[in-house]
Amino acid sequence: MTRGVVAIAALVALLAAGCSAPAETAPIVTSAPPPKPPAACNLVTLDEARHALGGPSELRADPSETQDSHSSCTFITHDPETTLLIVAGVGAAVGLDQELTLDERDLAATRTAIGKPSGAFMISGTELGKPRVEIGLAGSTFWLIASMRITGQSRAWLESRTVSVATIAASRL
C-alpha cells in the first residue's frame, strides 16, 4: 500500500471508531482593547482652573474618577456652589451625544452649536437655582465636557469662561 492509501485507511478507521478527524485550526484574531478615557484632571492645570473660576484662593481638584468609558475631575473651591467639572470619554460623537442628552434634561435647556471651540455645543441652564454652563465637543476617538457653576456670576460671564477652559482642555485630548 502507498502512504496515501494508508493515511485514508487510518482516517476511515478513526471515523468508524467514533473519533472525529482533526479540525483545522482557525486563525486567532485578536482585537486591541478599547481605548481608555484620558484622565480628566490632566486636561486642565490647577492654575488654569483657578483662572477660569475667577481666582479663588482655595482650590483643589478631586482625583480623576474613571467609570467605564469616561473619567471626570471636579475642581472645588471653599464655596460648594462654585465648581468646574471636566469629563472626558471614549466614543467620539456618539458618546458626547448621550452625555449631552442627559444634561439637557438635567438643566432643562437645549444644546446650541457654537463655533469656538470648533464643533462644540453649549448648554446654558439653571442648576439648583444658579446658572450652569456646559461646553461639549467630540474628537475622532474622545469627547470632552467642561461645565462651570460660579456663585454670583452672570450666565454670559460663565459662557465666556467655560469656552476658554474647554478650548484648553480640548487641545490636550
Image (cartoon, rainbow, N blue to C red):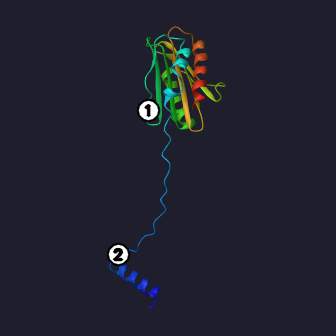
Q: Is residue 74 left or right of residue 137?
A: left
Task: Please tell me whether residue 128 is drawn above or below residue 116 in the rendered image.
Answer: above
Q: Is residue 2 left or right of residue 167?
A: left
- Residue at the right extreme, as displayed: 115
Question: How many neighbours does mark 2 have within 10 angstroms: few (below 14), some (14-19), or many (20 or more)?
Answer: few
Residue 17, how many percent across, how many down? 32, 79
Question: What residue does disc 2 label?
Answer: 19
Question: Which of 18/51 is in front?
Answer: 51
The residue lying at 47 percent from left, 33 percent from top is: 70
Residue 74, how many percent across, how many down? 46, 22
Q: Are marks 2 and 1 in contact (CB under 8 Å)?
A: no
- Of label 2 and label 1, which has the lower sequence position? 2
Q: The residue tagged with tag 2: helix, strand or loop?
A: loop
Query: Total marks drawn?
Result: 2
* Three-letter code for the amino acid on which mark 2 is drawn: Cys
Question: What residue does disc 1 label?
Answer: 66
The residue lying at 53 percent from left, 18 percent from top is: 47
The label on residue 24 is: none
Residue 102, how many percent across, how many down? 49, 28
Residue 23, how many percent across, how many down? 43, 70
